[in-house]
């Protein structure tokens, strides 16, 4: 039994009663405390519920406000888009209206020309019908004449209408003299007093000598630099009693072309060589080495042929070897490759300084960098083919290209040593290395021009994302290229090209600038990532893009 229990047993009834009342009072206090705690929990729960309801109402109001703001924003965007579409539709309608007017005008002109042609043909038909009615042709003669005229109409030079317009009407006597049969044997000959004692053959030869050679027609344009013309009287003599077919009183001729290839051949010379010595004069060899390039037995013509085939016409060594074999020169591909590389090494060594000096003198460069596989030795000493970068500098005026390899680097250090000493304009893409020279204060002698092909490519990539906007920029840039095409087709000089750009290209560029700046001011709201990238790219390239308005030699594309 515990100590407390033993104490409780030893107490009298009065003490036990007191302890019982005390215990009852304690239990009542605990019960009251528990009741108060329950009331507090209920109150706390009610407070939490009230806070929750208040927070939910605030959230509902907040999201409703956000929804209203988003709705207003997109409604505004849709309204602006509708306005833009309306303007674009209006512009397209105006363009289509102008095109329709132009087409209708062209159609009217073509119709007028067709009517004039039909009237002219009807007049000719009437005239020929009248001439035929006046003539005393038999049925067989008329049929022969119809077949003959048809042959003349559809022969090779039928499209040359000026052959049919000599301005002199054919008389009946001239037609009879040109008749292929012997129907004019009954017509007495009336020799002219001006002909003297000349024979008909001499008179014909004299008339042919006076005629100039027709070489101005497009289909008779020579294919060679020194064509040989054989006049009619030089290779042909009319048989006795014969005559040439005439049109409008003159012998009708045309040009018959023959192309003859004189195949080349190769001669291989072996000289038996010996050394000799002359007392008092020294020694020598019987056949000194006269080769153009050390170790290369080709003469100048053969060197030119191989280099032209391989580098101008992209003919592989295998095909060159086959061609040489057909012409009697048998050589394997490996030997030819070794010889070509010796030739290249010689030319590079002899011409390097000249080429570099020439390309540095120009004031107009086109620069780009590209990658390729290069055989390199790694840090471990292993030789591998790794991706490395090359630089290319092209001088359009000199038609020279300068390739640069600086350990495969694409950094500024690789190209800076060349651009720092350059004075003039150079065209590039938007690679960050080139933009160092956009600062006119630090680089006043170098002026960068942007490549419009790279700019247009960004909008081509964004076509699926925003077709109408991307096509607008693509079309405007296309118009700039169209102007350049017109200038090249007209053969304009650089100064004339610059005038055309200032008159025709500048308004287009102003429209482009206004367009992308409008989107930049709105922080490109509502646009996709690709469209935003294209607009930011053209914005950063704009200052370099305007450089084409300073020099007519600059190309729009790199």
Image (cartoon, helix red, strand yellow):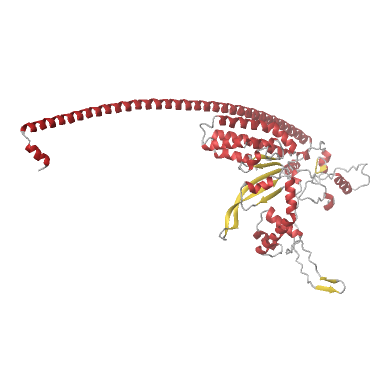
Residue at 52% across / 37% down in the picture? 529
**Where in the figure is residue 103, as x and y percent of width and height?**
64, 30
Q: The N terminus is located in which quarter?
A: top left
Q: Which of the pair 414/206 is nearer the observer?
A: 414
**Where in the figure is residue 155, as x and y percent of width and height?**
73, 45
Residue 463 visible in the current orientation: no
Toward the left, the furthest residue is 13
From the viewer's perspective, tell me whether residue 196 is left or right of residue 382: right
Residue 294 visible in the current orientation: yes
Q: Which of the pair 61/110 is nearer the observer?
A: 61
Q: Which of the pair 173/406 is nearer the observer?
A: 406
- Relative height, residue 465 to residue 78 (above, below): below
Count of marks, rendered view: 0
Q: Which of the pair 158/517 is nearer the observer?
A: 517
- Relative height, residue 66 to residue 177 (above, below): above
Quarter of image, res 429: top right
Q: The C terminus is located in which quarter?
A: top right
Residue at 72% across / 50% down in the picture? 356
- Relative height, residue 220 to residue 133 (above, below): below
**Where in the figure is residue 477, as x and y percent of width and height?**
62, 36
From the viewer's perspective, tell me whether residue 46 is left or right of residue 417: left
**Where in the figure is residue 242, as x and y percent of width and height?**
83, 49
């Amino acid at each position: 039994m515990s100590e407390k229990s033993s104490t409780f047993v030893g107490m009298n009834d009065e003490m036990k009663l007191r302890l019982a009342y005390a215990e009852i009072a304690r239990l009542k206090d605990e019960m009251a405390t528990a009741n108060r705690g329950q009331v507090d929990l209920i109150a706390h729960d009610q407070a939490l519920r009230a806070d929750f309801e208040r927070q939910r109402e605030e959230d509902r109001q907040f999201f409703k406000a956000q929804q209203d703001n988003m709705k207003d924003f997109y409604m505004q965007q849709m309204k602006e888009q509708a306005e833009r579409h309306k303007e674009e539709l209006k512009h397209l309608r105006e363009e289509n209206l102008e095109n329709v007017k132009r087409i209708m005008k062209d159609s009217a002109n073509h119709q007028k020309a067709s009517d004039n042609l039909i009237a002219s043909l009807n007049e000719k038909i009437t005239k020929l019908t009248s001439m035929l009615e006046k003539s005393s042709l038999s049925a067989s003669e008329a049929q022969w004449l119809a077949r003959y005229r048809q042959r003349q109409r559809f022969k090779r030079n039928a499209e040359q209408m000026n052959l049919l317009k000599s301005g002199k009407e054919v008389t009946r006597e001239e037609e009879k003299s040109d008749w292929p049969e012997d129907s004019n044997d009954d017509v007495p000959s009336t020799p002219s007093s001006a002909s003297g004692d000349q024979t008909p053959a001499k008179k014909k030869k004299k008339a042919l000598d006076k005629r100039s050679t027709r070489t101005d027609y497009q289909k008779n344009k020579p294919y060679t630099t020194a064509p040989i013309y054989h006049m009619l009287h030089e290779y042909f003599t009319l048989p006795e009693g014969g005559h040439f077919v005439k049109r409008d009183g003159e012998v009708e001729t045309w040009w018959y072309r023959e192309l003859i290839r004189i195949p080349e051949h190769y001669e291989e010379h072996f000289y038996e060589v010996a050394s000799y010595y002359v007392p008092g004069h020294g020694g020598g060899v019987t056949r000194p080495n006269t080769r153009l390039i050390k170790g290369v037995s080709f003469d100048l013509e053969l060197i030119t042929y191989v280099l032209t085939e391989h580098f101008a016409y992209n003919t592989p060594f295998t095909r060159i070897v086959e061609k040489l074999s057909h012409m009697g020169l048998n050589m394997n591909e490996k030997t030819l490759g070794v010889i070509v590389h010796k030739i290249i090494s010689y030319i590079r060594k002899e011409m390097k300084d000249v080429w570099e000096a020439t390309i540095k003198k120009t004031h107009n460069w086109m620069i780009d960098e590209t990658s390729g596989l290069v055989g390199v030795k790694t840090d471990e000493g292993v030789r591998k083919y790794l991706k490395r970068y090359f630089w290319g500098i092209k001088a359009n005026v000199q038609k020279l290209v300068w390739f640069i390899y600086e350990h495969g680097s694409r950094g500024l250090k690789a190209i800076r040593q060349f651009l720092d000493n350059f004075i003039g304009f150079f065209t590039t893409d938007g690679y960050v290395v080139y933009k160092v020279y956009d600062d006119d204060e630090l680089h006043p002698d170098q002026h960068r021009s942007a490549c419009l092909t790279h700019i247009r490519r960004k909008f081509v990539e964004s076509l699926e994302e925003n077709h109408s906007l991307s096509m607008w920029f693509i079309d405007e840039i296309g118009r700039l290229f169209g102007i350049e095409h017109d200038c090249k087709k007209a053969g304009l000089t650089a100064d004339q090209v610059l005038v055309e750009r200032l008159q025709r290209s500048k308004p287009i560029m102003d429209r482009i600038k206004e367009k992308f700046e409008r989107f930049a001011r709105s922080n490109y709201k509502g646009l996709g990532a690709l469209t935003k990238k294209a607009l930011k790219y053209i914005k950063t390239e704009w200052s370099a893009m305007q450089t084409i308005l300073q020099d007519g030699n600059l190309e729009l594309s790199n």
